[in-house]
Amino acid sequence: MAATRINDLAAIIDILDSQGRLARVKTEVDSRHELAGIARALEGGSRAVLFEKVKGHRWPVFAGLYWNRALLAGLLGRDAAALPHYVAACMARWLSAPADPVTAKSGPVLDVTEKDVDLGNIPVPVHALKDGGPYFDAAVVIAKDPETGLRNASIQRFQVAGRDTLRVKIDTGHPLEAYLEKAKRLDRNLWITLNCGVGPGLHFAASAPAEAALIERDALGLAGEFEGAPLELVPGTESDVEMAAHAMWALECEIVPGELAPEGPFAEAAGTYAPVAQHPVVHVRRVHRRERPIFQTMLAGMEMWNAAGLLGEAHLLALLQRQVPGVTDVHFTHGGAGCYHAVVQIAARRAGWSKQAILAAFAAFPPLKMVTVVDDDVDIRKAEDVEWAMATRLDPASGIVRIDNAFGDGLNPSFPGGLGPKVGFDATQTFPKRAEYERVAFKAVALDQYEISGPAPTLAAKPARAAPPPPIKPTASADWDENRWLKRELEAMKREGNGKAAPAAKPVPAQAAAEAVPDAAAAARKSKDWDEDRWLKRELEAMKREPAVKASMPAAKPPASKTHPVAPGAAAPPPLRAAERQPDDDEGSFFRGGAA
């Protein structure tokens, strides 16, 4: 194995900087919420981020190494899409010819040993708004089986609870949980080291699925396959548990079995808050660090999804290719939180193998809740392509596999107590394939071979939103009412027309004049797009024309009304003047919900 430089986070940051793939935040930021807010705004981009000034702390904070696979692929000299195949090959080499870590007398992590333990000196950020406090969420735990001495590496979340106290949530079924139970049975405390700021090799070794990292193997050996040389460790000063030689910080910790305290809430990879619960208390006995350390943190989001999903993909791909003929690729989607939804690509060789792939995937990777199987003409890393396959090839009657009360990830809220439903979707063509399922294809071309002129396309600018009209200024009355104002305006227009000469107007035919002043209810019934403002405008204009129109209108009998019945042979009563009208005759009653 040729040694690489990815075992040292400081060297990794230098490489990213030289490649133009590092964003430096030079403004001072608060480690409580502000730092994570900036990181979330940059999440998934082509650059990792280094916060150079953290309020109240001496040391910078780094994030984003895993939120874009292209960053990691650039460090490894690989194509991002080929990373799962590369990781699967590394795991296969480790399983066939494991290389154990080496222990040196000293290493960079022992540059400084703090005289007193004070976790407040470490710039541990608070991420989400409802998180219970600062968390170590990217540090690697190294522990030893109390009975056999076999080492194990894992990543758990550690909440800072005091100057020298942490609280840890241990994943259900993890070897660390078994180690703690064995220590309790042996009436011993469990010692661990917490290694913060490590290279991808050690991180991957700690993230490997339990089904891939065999419990009888030293999982730290897997780190050497990624780093190109055996992982370097240094001995602990408080116990026999080693520390990562090139870590930025290493905390030697002691867990007393049975000692519990409230931990949480915390923004987990599922995109929801893990609730407060009783979890083990961790006592920090010694703190070691580099001379100029950099704290590494990970957001609950793309970074966690990629870091966990990459190992899950590699493990599932290797297993499915051994068990299901025709499987060509696997992708853990971001929408599935990096470990709950797998899309499997298969080149079908016979009927039924797509469903076999669904069952095998659930058995190989228990955290999965959903598995979608598609043909090899579908790009499994494009959500719209996978959706197309589901929309055009999935038969709901026969292509959906449902499993109830299956074991899953307890961090997924739909698996309370670790049990919940799982579903698989067979979105492949029927076998043998039929012509109507064939996808449209076009000739592949290389655009750099063509002379294409014209400016680069830009998104059309959104039209400026028109300013809202100024509000109507109320009168001095404290009980301003727009409806009453409309009523007064209409009555004033009528009075003005009776007292002043009407402006000259063109002759209006009798029929048109009769229709010039429609009542509110009739207008509402006739208009398909009733608009109160237009109705008011027409009403005001009609009132202005009314004196001139009345002279040319023929006399007509007023219609009978409920309030003024007309007896047979009796003369019709004269129309009411405005002052004599009843409330139901008020033009403003339409706006107040009165009878039209």
Image (cartoon, helix red, strand yellow):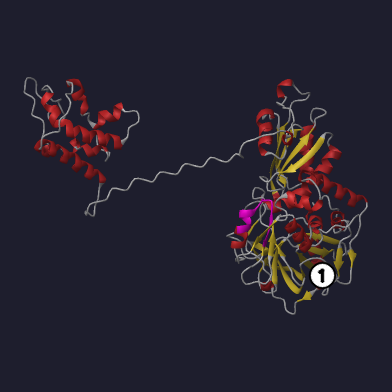
| Residue at disc 1, secondary structure | helix
Say above or below: 370 vs 253: above
Q: Which residue range is magenta in the image?
A: 38-50
Looking at the picture, how far across and down is residue 463, in whole percent? 47, 41
Say above or below: 220 vs 384: below
Q: Quadrant of the C terminus?
A: top left
Looking at the picture, how far across and down is residue 566, in whole percent? 10, 25
- The residue that mark 1 highlights is 108
Q: Is residue 233 magenta?
A: no
Query: Residue 562 falls in which quadrant of the image?
Result: top left
Say above or below: 250 vs 373: below
Q: Is residue 46 visible?
A: yes
- Work out whether residue 263 or residue 433 is closer to the camera in this orientation and state it: 433
Q: Residues within 10 Å of mark 1 (few under 14, many from 20)?
A: some
- Work out whether residue 469 or residue 432 is closer to the camera in this orientation and state it: 469
Question: Most extreme residue toward the bottom, as rendered?
Answer: 115
Left or right? Give the position of 469 relative to 56: left
Looking at the picture, how far across and down is residue 151, in whole percent? 85, 62
Question: Most extreme residue toward the right, as rendered?
Answer: 97
- Work out whether residue 503 or residue 476 is closer to the camera in this orientation and state it: 503
